[in-house]
Amino acid sequence: MTNPLKPSERMKIPRQHSIEQTAEDRIKNFFEVSFGLNEELALIEAKRCLECKNPVCIEGCPVRIDIPGFIKLILEKDYVGAVNKIREANYLPAICGRVCPQEDQCEIVCLLGKKHEPVAIGKLERFVADYEMANNLFETPVITNHIDKKVAVVGSGPAGLTCAAELAKMGYKVTIFEALHSTGGVLRYGIPEFRLPKKILDIEVDRIKKLGVEIYTNFVVGRTATLDELLDEWGFDAVFLGTGAGTPNFMGIPGENLSGVYSANEFLTRVNFMRAYAFPETDTPIKIGKQIAVIGGGNTAMDAVRTAKRLGAEKAYLIYRRSRTEMPARVEEVMHAEEEGIEFLMLTNPIRIIGDDFNWVKAIECQKMELGEPDESGRRKPVPVQGSEFILEVQTVIEAIGQKPNPIIQATTPGLDVSKKGTVVVDDVQRTSRPNVFAGGDLTRGGATVILAMRDGKIAAEEIHKYLQSVEAKKESATVNK
């Protein structure tokens, strides 16, 4: 079905918005904030697509989804066809439809967005994925090709899951090794339930299992078995490393050793993965004060401060040393945080955490900043304003200023090149310094988005296939030459 509307008519249709819980309701629960688009809204939104001859939105997508193709199928009301069109490039559409920053990728280059709001590509992706789930219409792809090669995927985050799915669809025998007792990596422990429900993640992981992928949990590569043992003793022909960046950074200011100071990684893991929000029904307690401060300006900081609000914080501060313009967090998440009553302290930098007589946090001292010349990131560098120090009364401080990879695999794998920041060094197609070892996601980037990790996993799968096929071809050639 071709869009019945002329381009000029499409441009007059306003962008459709998701149905959401009210801010007043959602700060009292951990249910999903957004319910997405219903069918009526999705069909209206799909009509906004200009069906460009040169669809630059595909170029803007890290995994190159055929965006006009799946939107056309929505117009035809072939929602299963639409989600399968997405799945040709991205096997986790229900996840990406929720957490992918489309506004900085496919939507930012949408031609409609030059004069109007861009097509809500992410919301349409979520709609078709949710429609398929709600109506139990998913069918596991039939894999007709079976390749007698084994690939180990280390880590079950977005990079690992994507790599495993792509290789399994090609016909490889794939095994995922996960250090924790449940799969998902940052999707499970880092992203709150109100943004990505665990039942959605569980369904997506189960679909990967149905491709024939085996999953071992509680298996720490570098401890339970080394990478070389997987290759030499377990008989794997190639390995993909996607172990993420789970070691938090700290500011190095006085008072970080006080009780009541968390890294965002620990805080979110306790709440999301170990269900501390349900204590005492669960075994994981978490204590926060009536006034809390989260340091940082990214999505992790936003997740942490909004989570603290839901746990009962009466005052929840977000302290960021630059201005709103420089914040790396998604615009939608910032907007939701503001609606939920989060107090933003911009151009503010903590300089020490103050404890009481029992070594618990009672306050944080901050200093106002102003923006100077751009630094190496291209953003204007914050400069302290002399004499602007002030003290903020808080009982909990959560630092969300970035993470780095756990060094276990790097330390136990000879010949694996590692950067000064502890990330595994790869080339532009995810190859490491070891010929049959590939890597991607935060392990190589040091912290990025879910969709970029998925991109790395997808590219790595393609390169692993090329590598294993070339190895097999060399073996055949050697046999013939004998």
Image (cartoon, rainbow, N blue to C red):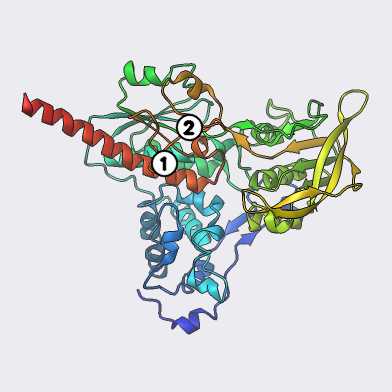
Quickly name the residue at label 2: 424
Indicate the quadrant containing the C terminus: top left, top right, bottom left or bottom right.
top left
Locate residue 329, reporting x and y percent.
Answer: 65, 52
Marks 1 and 2 sit apart, C-alpha to C-alpha, by 14 Å
- State the residue lying farthest toward the front: 373
Quickly name the residue at label 1: 457
Using the rendered view, name the quadrant where residue 61 is placed: bottom left
Instruction: Name the amino acid type tagged 2.
Output: Val
Up the image or down, 76 lies above or below 185; here it is below
Question: Looking at the image, which residue is at 43% across and 46% down?
Answer: 455
Locate residue 454, reporting x and y percent.
Answer: 45, 45
Locate residue 141, reporting x and y percent.
Answer: 31, 46
Camera-near label (1 vs 2) is 2
Q: Is residue 22 visible?
A: no
Q: Which badge, 1 or 2, is on the more N-terminal residue?
A: 2
Instruction: Name the amino acid type tagged 1.
Output: Gly
Disc number placed over residue 147 in the picture, else none: none
Q: Is residue 229 visible?
A: yes
Callouts 1 and 2 close, C-beta under 8 Å: no
Locate residue 342, reporting x and y percent.
Answer: 78, 51
**Nearer-the-camera pick, 464 or 146:** 464
Question: Looking at the image, which residue is at 52% across and 38% down?
Answer: 442
Query: Relative to 304, is 446 on the left or the right?
Result: left
Q: Regarding mark 2 in the picture, which secondary structure is present there?
A: loop
